[in-house]
């Protein structure tokens, strides 16, 4: 485990190469004091929603956190034609700006970034973002109007499953640990 400052510099010497995309984490942490965990992934079913005009929206209650919106970060707006990696502070800042107050942002042609208040929640959100992308794609293939989970339903889901019980993602985390 390596520790970095908000400029993406390792706080201890390491013989190992550091991840170039550490600027995603640094810049999100810099602007989002509510965020204590960040996942960046190359989730395969999510990527098509970042390269098409079809927005990612929640179809499953487990992904209701997507109801606030899932913006798409376009690296060309900041770096022109590039390798699509978030490899410096300027790109990290722009991505954090695109993310805004949302839980997820897509990176065109690359993947996504998911944020949350703790590790359990961010892992669950990352998993459910991929699951939701698969379900939404299936619903779109079936055709017809798709009924998405609304922001009001997201609020009700949070009250019921997080606020009232105080459990948050504890139960699913325990199940995943048991499976491992």
Image: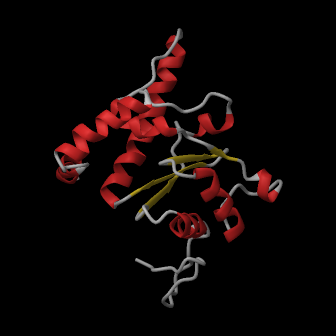
Question: In the visual, does 179 lie left or right of 66?
Answer: left
Question: In the visual, does 171 lie left or right of 17?
Answer: left
- Image quadrant where one finds the N terminus: bottom left
Horizontal and vertical percent position of residue 136: 48, 25
Question: In the visual, does 171 lie left or right of 14?
Answer: left
Residue extending farthest to the top is 144
Horizontal and vertical percent position of residue 30: 54, 70
> How many labels, in total?
0
Residue at 20% in and 48% down: 179
> 6 or 123: nearer the eye?
6
Note whether residue 144 is visible: yes
Residue at 67% in and 67% down: 87
Note whether residue 88 is visible: no
> 53 or 167: nearer the eye?
167
Residue extending farthest to the bottom is 13
Identify the image quadrant of residue 177: bottom left
Reply above or below: 161 against 8: above
Horizontal and vertical percent position of residue 142: 50, 12
Reply above or below: 132 against 170: above
> 159 or 76: nearer the eye?
159
Identify the image quadrant of residue 152: top left
Residue at 24% in and 49% down: 168
Horizontal and vertical percent position of residue 69: 54, 38
Reply above or below: 134 against 88: above
Identify the image quadrant of residue 31: bottom right
Q: How is the image coloured?
A: secondary structure
Reply above or below: 10 against 87: below
Residue at 41% in and 62% down: 37
């Amino acid at each position: 485990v390596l520790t970095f400052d908000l400029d993406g510099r390792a706080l201890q010497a390491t013989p190992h190469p550091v991840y170039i995309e550490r600027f995603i984490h640094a810049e999100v942490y810099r602007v989002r004091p509510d965020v204590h965990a960040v996942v960046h992934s190359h989730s395969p079913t999510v990527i098509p929603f970042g390269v098409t005009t079809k927005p990612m929206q929640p179809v499953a209650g487990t992904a209701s956190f997507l109801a606030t919106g899932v913006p798409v970060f376009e690296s060309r707006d900041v770096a022109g034609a590039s390798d699509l990696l978030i490899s410096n502070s300027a790109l990290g800042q722009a991505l954090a700006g695109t993310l805004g107050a949302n839980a997820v942002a897509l990176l065109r042609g690359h993947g996504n970034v998911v944020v949350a208040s703790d590790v359990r929640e961010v892992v669950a959100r990352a998993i459910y973002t991929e699951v939701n992308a698969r379900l939404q794609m299936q619903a779109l293939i079936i055709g017809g109007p798709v009924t998405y989970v609304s922001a009001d339903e997201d609020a009700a889901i949070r009250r019921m499953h997080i606020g009232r019980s105080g459990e948050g993602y504890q139960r699913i985390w325990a199940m995943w640990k048991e499976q491992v």
